[in-house]
Amino acid sequence: QVENEGRQSWLSLEGAHDKDPFTQYLHAFRYIMDAPSPPVITADSVMERFFDILLSIFCLVVIGSAISKISGTMVELRSMNEAKSKQRYEIRQYLHSQDASFELVSRVMKFVEY
């Protein structure tokens, strides 16, 4: 079905309704990958469409790996900060259990923070 409720399908938008199924599939895949704004310049041959799809998949992989690397770094930084916070908390608890003066606790904690 080329038209549905007065709207054009991707087949008629791309002029692919008379093409073979593989080419229609490439058109559909490219239309989905470039959504919501398919480019104005369209690929003319099967090879150009195939290259365009491979380029889109490559970009998705690169962006995904960059996001993964950033997330991993953030988790590592968070765990380092948690370890430091836990160490400061344990030192403060120890000093309070030994009835150290407020001045001594403050000086030790300043030293620990650096």
Image (cartoon, rainbow, N blue to C red):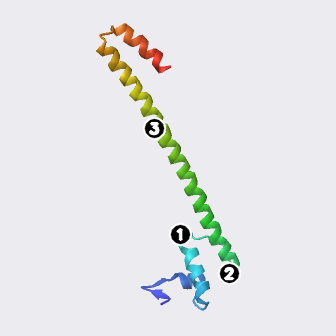
Res. 46 mark: 2
Query: x, y (%) of residue 16?
Result: 60, 86
Comparing marks 1 and 3, which lies closer to the viewer?
3
Q: Nearer the viewer, mark 3 or mark 2?
A: 3
User: Residue 74 at x, y = what percent?
Assistant: 49, 42
**Mark 1 crowdedness (10 Å alpha carbons): few <14, some 14-19, many ≥20:** few
| Residue 27 relative to residue 51: left or right | left
Question: On the image, numbered disc 3 is attached to which residue?
Answer: 78
* Above-or-below relation of 101 to 53: above
Tell which circle, 2 or 1, labels the residue nearer the N-terminal end.
1
Tag 3 and tag 2, C-beta contact below 8 Å: no
At 31% across and 15% down in the image, what residue appears? 96
Amino acid type, mark 2: Val
Q: Which of 8 and 57 is in front in this view?
A: 57
Q: Mark 1 points at which residue?
A: 35
Total numbered badges shown on the rendered structure: 3
State how far apart marks 3 and 2 are (Cα).
48 Å
User: Measuring 40% from the left and 23% from the top, which residue is drawn there?
Assistant: 88
Do callouts 1 and 3 mark residues in contact (Cβ within 8 Å)? Answer: no
Helix, strand, or loop for circle 3? helix
Quadrant position of residue 79: top left
